Image: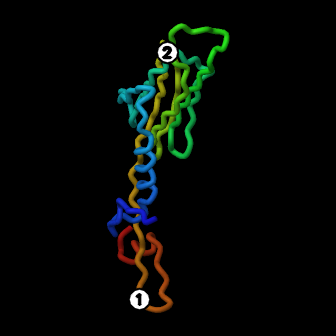
């Protein structure tokens, strides 16, 4: 089977992981449980909160894990076999909801209040770094000068 590449431009080198990420996101389209994603005020960096409506679940029936830059929330309710229902409109069901996290995003806390599971995320400010790459000469045996040697040779200090 031939796979069609979304990022087949020669200018997009090394984006195979992004293509796999888009495939994962497309497969996770179940609508249960409903959720909100909100941006929070933060002194530095970026702060987010994911709120899932998990009414009827206790803390012991929920799990929050981070697996390969993916936040996974699982819920599993067990049927109470001691009860006899005449009508069952609230089903005991299990779920798994996944959120793909960008590099650097950290899960800070998770708490359950009034049937809402709130997960706080934070992405600290990134430091922009510029790195100079030395270019070697065409002469055989010539070794690249280090950045400090190159600056000294040009007269810049």
Q: Is residue 67 left or right of residue 150?
A: right
Image depth: mark 2 or mark 1 in front: 2
Residue 41 location, x and y as percent?
A: 35, 27
The quadrant where residue 11 appears: bottom left
Towards the viewer: 43 or 63: 63
Residue 136 location, x and y as percent?
A: 43, 81
Towards the viewer: 53 or 71: 53
Above or below, comparing residue 12 to residue 31 in the picture:
below
Which numbered circle lies on residue 138?
A: 1
Residue 115 location, x and y as percent?
A: 48, 15
Q: Secondary structure at mark 1?
A: loop
Q: Secondary structure at mark 2?
A: loop
**Circle 1: is it few (<14), some (14-19), or many (20+) Cα within 10 Å?**
few
Above or below, comparing residue 40 to residue 6 in the picture:
above
Quadrant of the rendering where the C terminus is positioned = bottom left
Towards the viewer: 91 or 147: 91
Q: Residue at x 48, y 87 (%)?
A: 142
- Residue under numbered circle 2: 90
């Amino acid at each position: 089977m031939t796979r069609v590449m979304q990022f087949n431009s020669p200018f997009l080198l090394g984006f195979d992981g992004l293509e796999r990420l888009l495939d994962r996101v497309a497969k996770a389209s179940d609508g249960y449980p409903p959720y909100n994603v909100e941006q929070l005020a933060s002194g530095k960096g970026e702060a987010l909160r994911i709120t899932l409506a998990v009414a009827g679940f206790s803390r012991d029936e929920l799990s929050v894990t981070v697996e390969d830059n993916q936040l996974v929330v699982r819920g599993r309710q067990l049927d109470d076999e001691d009860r006899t229902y005449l009508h069952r409109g609230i089903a005991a069901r299990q779920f798994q909801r996944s959120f793909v996290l960008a590099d650097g995003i950290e899960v800070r806390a998770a708490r359950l209040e009034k049937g809402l599971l709130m997960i706080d995320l934070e992405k600290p400010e990134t430091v922009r770094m510029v790195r100079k790459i030395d270019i070697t000469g065409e002469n055989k045996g010539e070794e690249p000068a280090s950045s400090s040697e190159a600056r000294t040779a040009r007269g810049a200090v």
